[in-house]
Image (cartoon, coloured by chain):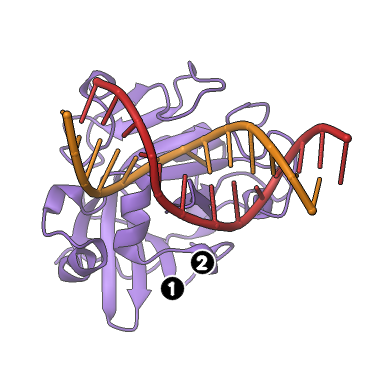
Chain colours: A purple, B orange, C red
Amino acid sequence: MTHPCSPIQREALPSGTVALARWLIGKAVVREMPEGQVSGRIVETEAYLVGDAASHAYRGQTGRNRSMFLDRGFAYVYLAYGTSFMLNVASETAGVGEAVLIRALEPLSGISMMERHRGTTNLRDLARGPGRLAQALGIDRALDGVDLCAPGPLWLGQDAHEPGEIGTSIRIGITKDADRPLRFYRRGSRFVSGPKSLNL
DNA sequence: AGTGCGATTGACT
DNA sequence: GTCAATCGCACTA
């Protein structure tokens, strides 16, 4: 197993939300549960910026989005469509509301636990899409605001693996500021979400 | 207090 | 390919 075993230090995160979104491709998300460890390699991200009408922080800080305004490396978790939790990484200095949405993982460890959480054994479907990813890792609002750069229930790890070639596209599922090239993905990975036309 | 709307998913034609 | 489910939250009054 190629387990990462300690969190990436906050100082190692690149500054700038777009830089972080690209850099996170190929890093690992690690979830510690009572039953064991679940982890996956990040293969798809999106950036949400200040002045971006698609961002939850567009109209400033609110009860839901306050974790977007934490320092780099803290988690912002929210519920979308009443059904799916979304995992984001706050990406700027404290007080600035920007974040990176983690959209898809390539399963690395704890796969049987992911299968149980997701109700399928289809490896490709375990964490392809932000809602599926959160379900596979048992992520919900209880993890909103946790430090992903510290040991605990959820953290970011190095992965002994090349990030691969990174593609860029418009973001998925938004209607405002929909033309900006702020989605990043591992080119050629079968674990990325989205239509073929955005994964070239 | 009421209303409209998603950073999605799964089921179905 | 289409489409409804589902609910917390932000916005209006």
Residue found at x 20% / y 63%: A119
**Quadrant in the rendering for residue A31:** bottom left
Residue receiving disc 2: A143
Please say if the residues under marks 2 and 1 sit with CB atoms less than 8 Å apart: yes
Tell me the crowding category of disc 2: few under 14, some 14 to 19, or many 20 or more residues within 10 angstroms, Cα based: some
Foreground residue among C8 and A58? C8
**Res. A43 mark:** none
**Quadrant in the rendering for residue A45:** top left
Distance from the alpha carbon under mark 2 to that under mark 1: 8 Å
Foreground residue among A96 and A110? A110
Q: Quadrant of the N terminus of chain A?
A: bottom left
Residue found at x 56% / y 36%: A16
Residue receiving disc 1: A153
Q: Nearer the viewer, mark 2 or mark 1?
A: 2
The relative height of residue A49 versus residue A159 in the rendered view (above or below) is above
Is residue A24 among what the camera can see? no
Q: Position of residue A56 (x, y in %)?
A: 62, 39
Q: Position of residue A50 (x, y in %)?
A: 66, 31
